[in-house]
């Protein structure tokens, strides 16, 4: 750790410009990624919507939707919030701010050209790791840049204890690096084609070790980092139990990695791997819900804010969906339940209760919190944000209900046999009966997208024509460094971090 | 401060190097115990009579399947369940996939499983179906792939480079097979190659494994 003088020079300011830019990109990818999602939902009802264009074909643009949302929207939002919160929990500006800008723009270039390459049919087929090897290398380099900026800032920190949100962001950076590198190992044939180092069943096991933990450490762990900083900030309460957050972090980090094989129940992989995956998935419920309980108890002293503050509404609703998805996941990992749910739209519904209900909602809440503070200007319209909240809730509920209906029907009808062991229904008939569910899903997705467009307008109006306000790290060092192990004192960092800031709060 | 755990954790949360190492260590255990052994497990790795080495044409067809994202809606994995065996055929065995790079098991059946598709329909049925699915399956929601009938199989990358790369990974392609490959693709459309691939899917199973 480099030695820093205790007095902070007056020229030292937080680098929020890069945060603002990342927020803008996240909003852009959210709108585009969800629009593509709505489009492919429509293609499942009207297959002619690809108009005979190969690049509009479902098989090519469905990965564009998932990659755009996870890596465009999700990762940009994670980088933005990580850069914002790590400065304020460390009481120092970003380490290597230029590298932060390079990471920001480099990432957007990868998402843009990666997306186009998917339309061109370059794909390794591995879910959430479809991009071909040149992009995999670019992602690795940019990820290292992200790590240098993030961990460098922590190494420079003026607060002795590293706050819990930073462990989750740190877990995101480290574990995703490990998974990304191992899963994408391949021998290139040409610039746009490679063959995986693993074959068949082994490839499947490695892929779902990656795939499940991309969900685990990016969409769950990374966003828990967001939760642990922005929820206490917005509620203006310290974390209910710091000790519980410690325990659940390590339990989460240890357990999640084992759960991947529940994606391969009754597939051609060893049974012990499946059973272990199922048991660990069930155990995972404990750390997941520990975090949810910790979050809810933290809000419990600030319920009144829910009536007036749209950011708070989004964050608390996200927590509820987090609880739902982390309960549903372990249930679906039980082998006898998985017989029904596997390969069906139930999985799609489960993913979206996480992606819409948890990831998108907490990001929206965080953006509604962060943007007015960064810009030093109140939110353009609290009313629009409230409308957005109800659209997001309605859209998510419709989506999930439709997919539950579709998924459970598919699962049960596919398995349905009569008393002499003959199948009761043809596959085509079951597929054709999905139209009402798919229609409902399309409506849900459209409603959710409409809410996101409202937010984009609201936040861009809030940001329009302004630079981010100048915020310097507050001088709180000595007392904090001198304190004994008092976990809640750590929250002195982020809360005190507001001291030098004149920005009015939203709503 | 009496508990060791608390003292240890205090060190971790005060030292970023230790915290990084701790996260890496704790998260690596699962993979080392659960994933690494399967990499060395012969029954998942070695070819048997059930394993089929793709010909140059089939390999090209498989790359068409990959490029068009067929795996997004079709699984290639028949589970050992009565209804699945009834609907699709014998359940899938691990040794049938040792030449599958990457694996094509899929995670979603918007359309039916394809692992035992080979031989169930005629080549002509497949051609008509791929060019316009609704002309043979009225309710189908599958996209149409008319362009595959126009695109040439040789345009899908250097087949010899592909086979040589796979040979490095242990696929036993002979030098003669590699030499002959471009000639076999000559004059073929991507549709032809894809149909060839679909027709051998799941047909390699000869032996009842336990």
Image: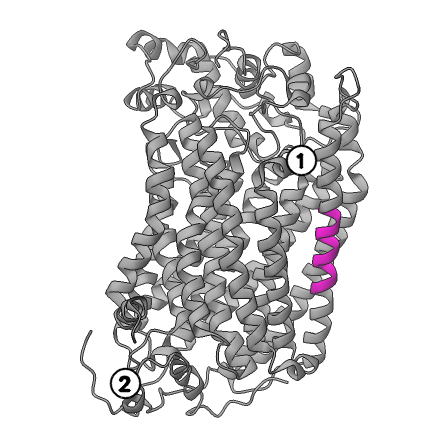
The residue at which mark 2 appears reads as A481
State the separation of the CA atoms marked 1 and 2: 55 Å
- Looking at the rendered structure, the secondary structure element under dot 2 is helix
Query: Magenta stretch mostly in which secondary structure?
Result: helix
| Residue found at the far left of this picture | A3
Residue drawn at point x = 28 percent, y = 79 percent: A160
On whether disc 1 and disc 2 are found on a single subunit, the reply is yes
Residue drawn at point x = 20 percent, y = 87 percent: A5
The answer to which quarter of the image holds residue A19 is bottom left
Point out the stretch of residues depicted in magenta: A392-403
| In front of the other: B143 or A152 | A152
Determine which of the numbered discs, if any, sits on residue A340 in the image.
1
Quadrant (top left, top right, bottom left, bottom right) of the C terminus of chain A:
bottom right
A114 vs A3: above or below: above
| In front of the other: A199 or B135 | A199
B172 vs A461: above or below: above
Q: Are marks 1 and 2 in contact (CB under 8 Å)?
A: no
Question: Where's residue B7, x and y in %?
Answer: 28, 71
**Can residue A486 be seen by looking at this rendering?**
yes
Question: Where's residue B83, x and y in %?
Answer: 68, 22
């Amino acid at each position: 750790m480099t030695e820093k003088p205790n007095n902070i020079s007056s020229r030292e300011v937080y680098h929020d410009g890069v945060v603002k830019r990342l927020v803008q990109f996240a909003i852009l990818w959210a709108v585009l990624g969800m629009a593509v999602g709505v489009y492919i939902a429509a293609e499942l009802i009207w297959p002619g919507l690809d108009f005979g264009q190969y690049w509009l074909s479902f098989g090519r643009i469905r990965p564009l939707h998932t990659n755009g949302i996870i890596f465009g929207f999700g990762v940009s939002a994670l980088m933005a919030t990580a850069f914002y919160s790590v400065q304020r929990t460390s009481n120092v500006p970003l380490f290597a701010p230029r590298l932060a800008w390079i990471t920001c723009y480099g990432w957007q270039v990868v998402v843009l050209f990666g997306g186009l390459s998917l339309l061109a049919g370059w794909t390794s087929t591995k879910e959430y790791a479809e991009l071909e090897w040149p992009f995999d290398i670019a992602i690795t380099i940019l990820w290292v840049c992200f790590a240098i900026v993030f961990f460098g800032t922590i190494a420079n920190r003026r607060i002795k204890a590293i706050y819990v949100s930073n462990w989750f962001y740190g877990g995101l950076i480290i574990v995703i690096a490990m998974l990304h590198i191992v899963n994408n190992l391949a021998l290139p044939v040409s610039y746009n084609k490679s063959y995986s180092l693993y074959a068949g069943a082994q490839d499947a096991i490695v892929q779902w070790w990656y795939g499940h933990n991309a969900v685990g450490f990016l969409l769950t762990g990374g966003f828990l980092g967001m939760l642990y900083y922005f929820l206490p900030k917005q509620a203006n309460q310290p974390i209910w139990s710091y000790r519980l957050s410690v325990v659940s972090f390590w339990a989460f980090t240890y357990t999640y990695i084992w759960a991947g094989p529940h994606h391969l129940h009754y597939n051609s992989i060893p049974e012990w791997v499946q059973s272990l995956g199922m048991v660990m998935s069930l155990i995972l419920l404990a750390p997941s819900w520990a975090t949810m309980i910790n979050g809810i108890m933290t809000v419990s002293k600030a319920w009144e804010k829910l009536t007036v503050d749209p950011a708070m509404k989004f964050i608390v609703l996200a927590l509820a969906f987090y609880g739902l998805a982390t309960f549903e996941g372990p249930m679906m990992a039980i082998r006898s339940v998985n017989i029904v749910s596997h390969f069906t739209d139930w999985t799609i519904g489960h993913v979206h209760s996480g992606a819409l209900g948890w990831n998108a909602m907490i990001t929206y809440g965080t953006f509604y919190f962060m943007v007015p503070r960064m810009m030093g200007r109140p939110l353009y319209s609290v009313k629009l944000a409230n409308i957005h909240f109800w659209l997001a809730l309605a859209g998510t509920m419709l989506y999930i209900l439709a997919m539950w209906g579709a998924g459970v029907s598919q699962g049960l009808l596919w398995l349905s046999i009569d008393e002499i062991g003959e199948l009761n229904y043809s596959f085509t008939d079951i597929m054709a009966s999905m139209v009402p569910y798919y229609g409902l899903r399309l409506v849900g997705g459209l409603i959710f997208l409409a809410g996101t467009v409202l937010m984009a307008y609201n936040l861009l109006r809030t940001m329009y024509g302004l630079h981010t306000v100048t915020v310097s790290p507050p001088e709180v060092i000595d007392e904090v460094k001198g304190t004994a192990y008092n976990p809640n004192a750590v929250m002195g960092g982020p809360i005190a971090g507001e001291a030098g800031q004149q920005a009015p709060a939203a709503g | 401060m009496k508990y060791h755990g608390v003292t240890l954790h205090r060190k971790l949360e005060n030292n970023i190097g230790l915290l990084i190492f701790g996260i890496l260590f704790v998260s690596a255990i699962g993979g080392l115990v659960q994933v690494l052994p399967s990499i060395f497990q012969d029954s998942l790795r070695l070819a048997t009579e059930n394993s089929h080495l793709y010909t140059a044409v089939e390999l090209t067809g498989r790359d068409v399947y990959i490029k068009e994202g067929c795996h997004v809606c079709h699984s290639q994995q028949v589970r050992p369940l009565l209804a699945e065996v009834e609907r699709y055929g014998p359940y899938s065995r691990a040794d049938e996939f040792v030449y599958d790079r990457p694996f094509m098991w899929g995670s979603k059946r918007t359309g039916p499983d394809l692992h035992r598709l080979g031989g169930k329909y005629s080549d002509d049925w497949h051609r008509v179906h791929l060019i316009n699915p609704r002309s043979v399956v009225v309710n189908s929601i599958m996209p149409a792939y008319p362009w595959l009938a126009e695109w040439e199989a040789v345009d899908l990358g250097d087949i010899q480079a592909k086979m040589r790369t796979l040979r490095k990974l242990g696929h036993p392609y002979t030098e003669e097979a590699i030499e002959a490959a471009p000639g076999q693709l000559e004059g073929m459309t991507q549709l032809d190659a894809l149909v060839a691939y679909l027709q051998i899917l799941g047909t390699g199973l000869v032996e009842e494994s336990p």
